[in-house]
Image (cartoon, rainbow, N blue to C red):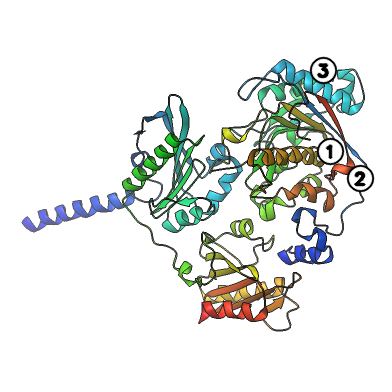
């Protein structure tokens, strides 16, 4: 059956029946969303010493932060046991990273994840780390589990480079998802059956980027040392939490609410339209650990 | 004999000129020769890097899609450093044709005009210029008085070394000037770019393609904001096809052909004349929508 073309009028229709919400595109509610999910747990962990120097994480501290976040998230004190609730020794695990040249996931974060997957009993040759090559990578092709890790940053097409957005490399024509501020990125997760396969989402907040400028969509000036990680099984909840922090930073920096050039509405629509997870803070159980100064949330 | 010699000389000259023309085709220019190596004590650092259509994502990530939507050919990047001052990144894009350079320039219209090249805007350390088939981005990683002066001086040098001017796409001239917002004209021929500036539909319902020309203008009146989209098609058949598709997908229930009050109580109207399709979005009244169409098709 041919799919229905979604036009601007479909959004206007929704706005017309929910006038209070109509001004906020991200709050659009389209029928056929799945039933609301239960409260999602998100762990935000920060450490004042997480960076050795500009954009250079301290590997040991990052490992400690990840361990504490994961044990808290799954409610298991032993790190290996905690990871074993996510990954089994027979799994083939793809770590979906992000190699954006100015702001990558970082080797330190990738390595901290890989170490714990090894500890969980997965053979090294069954673990892959990749970004742009995931569609051809044999590990990712046969992966039974995925760990999704990327830095948080503002983004030209989607408003925010989010955990949801990080899976765009699984589709052959990424640009097909760029329309309407990447509103329907969550469909990738559902269509490619990535939702259940993804065991953990890690939004790297060591140096989040809060503003986009120029062809590179990047300037050192617009990142700050937040020194945090956001960890959750729910990508939407992780992204929603990260977005709140970025928005708060923008307000602090600009002295007023300066909307992002591209609204990050794909995060809220991932809940309201696609039922991928929860974006509404009221539905998120946020656990804050570690350094509190400038937490912004 | 003399005739033969002159004939050979003529062939050699003609051949040489043909070769020169060939060498100057898009993508073949040494872009490095158009950029300086030193400005206001900032000096080029390391070797230039060149990125093609295939490799642009390695350099500018997902935003590379914007340049591809304008049929980008090649980018040469040069970094400039000065002890104790912010780095300046110079990116020179060969966009193949002037219309593409102009189009990519209209993608981001933030900033103040600074009178360089055929169009230039400066904001917060970023200077963007278009001239001929080239788009130039000069970005100081931090804005200081010195870095701003250097970026502007660099822009002037690059612009003066580009020995060509480009023609503005003629469709621009069809936009009525009354109430047209300054710095609101976007030129493109790709529906992803249209959707970035004004979301119309997830599918390419207007059949925008490289052989079309489209311009979007924003109009501001006391009754609010509305938009005018013009699309030129290569022939009447294509224009009619797009017109009918728009009617069927966007306003199938319109009682009067080509005009409809949408759910936000504003008016959308469409008209076709020869190869030109004109659409008004969010006009405050039916009369205002018709007036806009008339202003284009008078």
Contact? badges 1 and 2 (CB < 8 Å): yes
- Mark 3 to mark 1 CA distance (whole Å): 23 Å
Q: Residue at x 43, y 28 (%)?
A: B81
Q: Whole-percent x and y of residue B85?
A: 46, 28
Q: How much space separates mark 2 and mark 3, taking CA atoms?
A: 31 Å
Q: Quadrant of residue A125?
A: top right
Q: Residues within 10 Å of mark 2 (few under 14, many from 20)?
A: few
Q: Residue furthest bottom?
A: B256
Q: Residue furthest left?
A: B2
Is the Cβ of the residue at disc 2 closer than 8 Å to that at disc 3?
no
Q: Which is nearer the N-term, disc 1 or disc 2?
A: 2
Q: Is residue A41 left or right of residue B95?
A: right
In-front residue for pair B284/B196: B284
Q: Chain of mark 1?
A: A
- Which element carries disc 1, helix, strand or loop? loop
- On-image quarter of the N terminus of chain A: bottom right
Q: Considering only vertical position in the picture, is B189 above or below A216? A: below
Residue A119, labelled with which disc? Answer: 3
**To which quarter of the image does residue B184 belong?**
bottom right
Where residue A234 is drawn, which disc sits there? 1
Q: Which residue is mark 2?
A: A37
Nearer the N terminus, badge 2 or badge 3?
A: 2
- A39 or A226, nearer to the observer: A226
Query: Would residue A185 be seen by someone viewing this image from the given angle?
Result: no
Kindly identify which numbered label has been placed on residue A250: none
Looking at this view, is B110 or B24 the one in front? B110
B279, above or below A53, in the image: below
Classify mark 3: helix, strand or loop.
Answer: helix
Where residue B87 appears, as percent x and y from the top left, is: 47, 31
Q: Chain of mark 2?
A: A
């Amino acid at each position: 059956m041919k799919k229905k073309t979604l036009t601007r009028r479909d959004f206007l229709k929704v706005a017309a029946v929910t006038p209070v919400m109509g001004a906020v595109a991200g709050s659009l509610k389209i029928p056929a969303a799945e039933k609301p999910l239960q409260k999602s747990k998100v762990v935000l962990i920060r450490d004042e010493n997480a960076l050795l120097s500009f954009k250079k994480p301290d590997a040991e501290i990052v490992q400690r932060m990840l361990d504490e976040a994961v044990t808290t998230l799954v409610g298991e004190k032993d790190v290996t046991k905690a990871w074993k609730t996510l990954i089994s020794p027979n799994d083939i695990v793809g770590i979906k990273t992000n190699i954006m040249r100015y702001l990558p996931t970082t080797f330190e974060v990738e390595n901290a994840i890989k170490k714990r997957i090894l500890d969980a009993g997965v053979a090294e040759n069954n673990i892959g780390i990749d970004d742009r090559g995931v569609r051809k990578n044999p590990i990712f092709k046969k992966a039974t589990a995925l760990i999704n890790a990327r830095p948080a940053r503002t983004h030209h097409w989607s408003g925010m480079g989010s955990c949801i957005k990080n899976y765009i490399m699984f589709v052959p024509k990424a640009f097909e998802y760029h329309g309407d501020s990447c509103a329907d990125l969550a469909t990738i997760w559902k269509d490619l059956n990535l939702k259940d396969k993804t065991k953990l989402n890690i939004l790297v907040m060591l140096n989040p980027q809060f503003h986009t400028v120029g062809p590179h969509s990047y300037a050192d000036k617009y990142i700050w040392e937040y020194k945090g990680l956001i960890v959750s099984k729910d990508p939407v909840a992780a992204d929603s939490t990260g977005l709140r922090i970025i928005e708060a930073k923008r307000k602090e920096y600009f002295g007023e609410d300066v909307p992002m050039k591209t609204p990050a509405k794909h995060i809220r629509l991932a809940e309201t339209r696609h039922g991928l997870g929860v974006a509404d803070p009221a539905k998120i159980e946020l656990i804050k650990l570690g350094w509190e100064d400038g937490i912004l949330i | 004999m003399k005739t033969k010699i002159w004939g050979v000389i003529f062939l050699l000259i003609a051949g040489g000129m043909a070769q020169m023309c060939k060498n100057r085709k898009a993508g073949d220019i040494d872009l490095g020769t158009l950029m300086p190596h030193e400005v206001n004590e900032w000096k080029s650092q390391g070797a230039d890097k060149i990125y093609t259509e295939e490799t642009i994502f390695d350099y500018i990530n997902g935003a590379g899609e914007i340049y591809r939507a304008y049929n980008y050919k090649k980018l040469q990047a040069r970094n400039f450093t000065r002890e104790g001052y912010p780095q300046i990144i110079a990116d020179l894009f060969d966009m193949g044709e002037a219309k593409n350079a102009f189009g990519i320039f209209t993608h981001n219209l933030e900033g103040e005009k600074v009178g360089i090249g055929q169009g230039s805007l400066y904001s917060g350390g970023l200077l963007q210029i278009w001239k001929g088939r080239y788009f130039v981005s000069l970005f100081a990683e931090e804005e200081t008085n010195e870095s701003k002066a250097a970026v502007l001086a660099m822009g002037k040098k690059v612009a003066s070394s580009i020995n060509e001017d480009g023609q503005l796409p003629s469709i621009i001239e069809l936009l009525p000037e009354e109430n047209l917002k300054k710095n609101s004209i976007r030129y493109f021929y790709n529906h992803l770019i249209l959707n970035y500036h004004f979301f119309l539909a997830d599918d390419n319902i207007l059949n925008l393609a490289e052989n079309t020309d489209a311009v979007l203008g924003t109009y501001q009146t006391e009754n609010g904001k509305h938009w005018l989209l013009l699309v030129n098609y290569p022939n009447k058949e294509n224009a009619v096809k797009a017109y009918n598709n728009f009617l069927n997908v966007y306003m199938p229930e319109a009682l009067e052909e080509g005009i409809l009050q949408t759910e936000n109580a504003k008016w959308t109207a469409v008209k076709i004349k020869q190869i030109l399709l004109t659409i008004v979005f969010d006009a405050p009244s039916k009369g205002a929508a018709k007036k806009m169409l008339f202003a284009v098709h008078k």
